[in-house]
Image (cartoon, rainbow, N blue to C red):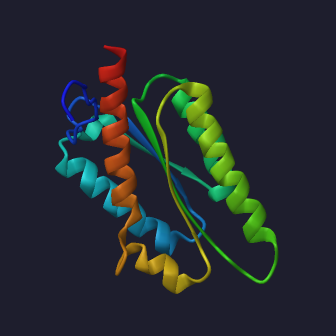
Amino acid sequence: MAGHRTIEGGRSAKGLRIAIVAARFNHFVVEKLLAGAVETLTQAGISTQDLDIIRVPGAFELPLAARKLAQSRNYEAVITLGAVIRGGTPHFDYVSSECVRGVSEAARDSGVPVILGVLTCDDLEQATERAGGAHGNKGADAALAAIEMADLLRKLDG
């Protein structure tokens, strides 16, 4: 389309400072998400001193840590990584809903991209498929979204 401008973020992490908040619960899935995110950020050129990894107990605790990091203004983006797997009780619904809501609010309230890299799956098979299996690595996808959004906001601010 002629006559309009398109502004979008790039794919280079050089010069970006990014935090990853990773849940310890369901660590066998989250560690794969974390490995995908770190590999993606490294390949995109992030410096090791510009990447911090923060551990929290579970997905429910991700939003508070992410909000604190985003509000610090020490990071251009914050990535949240976790896995909530459905069980036989309503616990899944409460944790996943509050986690997603809290991550969204952290981004909105801080003005810093807070990326949702939290799997909400019916079973372990679905989770492993999305943590480096048949459906890719959602940690890597979250890292790409963080890079692009951080760069986009730089462009929009500049």
Q: Nearer the viewer, residue 6 or 65?
A: 6
Relative side of 91 to 37, left or right: right
Relative side of 51 to 3, left or right: right
Residue 17 seen:
no
x, y percent for residue 11: 22, 42
Extreme top residue here?
158
x, y percent for residue 96: 68, 61
When the figure is inspected, residue 76 is found, relative to residue 133, above or below; the finding is above
Residue at (42% x, 73% y) in the render: 130
Relative side of 82 to 156, left or right: right
x, y percent for residue 125: 50, 86
Residue at (31% x, 40% y) in the render: 147
Residue at (56% x, 35% y) in the render: 107
Quarter of the rendering occupied by the N terminus: top left
Q: Nearer the viewer, residue 109 or 72?
A: 109
Q: Nearer the viewer, residue 119 or 68?
A: 119
Residue 151 seen:
yes
When the figure is inspected, residue 130 is found, relative to residue 46, above or below; the finding is below
